[in-house]
Image (cartoon, rainbow, N blue to C red):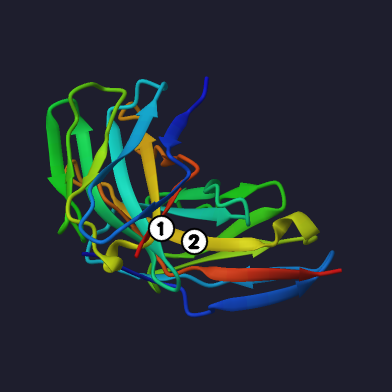
Amino acid sequence: AQTVTQSQPEMSVQEAETVTLSCTYDTSESDYYLFWYKQPPSRQMILVIRQEAYKQQNATENRFSVNFQKAAKSFSLKISDSQLGDAAMYFCAYRSAKNTGNQFYFGTGTSLTVIP
Amino acid sequence: NAGVTQTPKFRILKIGQSMTLQCTQDMNHNYMYWYRQDPGMGLKLIYYSVGAGITDKGEVPNGYNVSRSTTEDFPLRLELAAPSQTSVYFCASRTGSSYNSPLHFGNGTRLTVT
């Protein structure tokens, strides 16, 4: 099984500031997919952003962007201009690109607090 | 388009009882998954299915069973419930038509076994 590590159980950020959530993963594969999911108090899991390992360009979605460092096996999420609605648990996930790579492996999550 | 629908939202079971968590999706997704979420542990895969009639074990399958008789439905069966099965359960699905397709999740079922 692949290992996905989120080393920051909790983070906080001032409203309108920028915060970066860390994620590292362990794999011997060269092709895979990475995802960030947000889980607000409502419990719904919401896709934030995704990245294909073969793409060198970092993915962006509005205020959310990633810093994908393939050699370091690092996939951090940057949230710019933080808003109160960004407060949630954030999970990093990995999936192999192999035909048999059907499983998604999740990290243990980072709880983000946004301070008004 | 309802997406992924899970029922019930909450359930309390006594030790040794059995129950089925229902999951249905209306997106014609081939792949379906069951995860459990425990505090501080992230999501762990219980079972998954790549299509009707095909199921496979994930990381933590013991104490659970699944079936996939149709594309839409993927029920999770708990036999002889134990306190260790107290958790939040998520059903998810994804299409097989794109390689980087993400998971679409239901709203979860909070199960307590006492």
Q: Quadrant of the N terminus of chain A?
A: bottom left
Tell me the SS state at disc 2.
Answer: strand
Q: Which residue bears the numbered disc 2?
A: A91
Q: Quadrant of the C terminus of chain A?
A: bottom right
Residue B98 visible, this angle: no
Left or right for A84, reference A56: right
- Badge 1 density bin: few <14, some 14–19, many ≥20, Cα 10 Å: many
Residue B55 visible, this angle: yes
Three-letter code for the amino acid on which mark 1 is drawn = Ala
Q: Chain of mark 2?
A: A
Q: CA distance from mark 2 to mark 1?
A: 6 Å
**Residue nearest the viewer, comparing B4 with B114:** B114
Q: Which residue bears the numbered disc 1?
A: A93
Left or right for B60, reference B29: left
Residue A66 in percent (x, y) is at: 57, 59
Q: Quadrant of residue B49?
A: top left
Tell me the SS state at disc 1.
Answer: strand
Tell how many labels.
2
Q: Residue at x 71, y 58 (%)?
A: A86
Left or right for B105, reference B64: right
- Badge 2 density bin: few <14, some 14–19, many ≥20, Cα 10 Å: many
Residue A15 in percent (x, y) is at: 83, 66
**Residue nearest the viewer, comparing B92 with A73:** B92
**Residue nearest the viewer, comparing B29 with B24:** B24
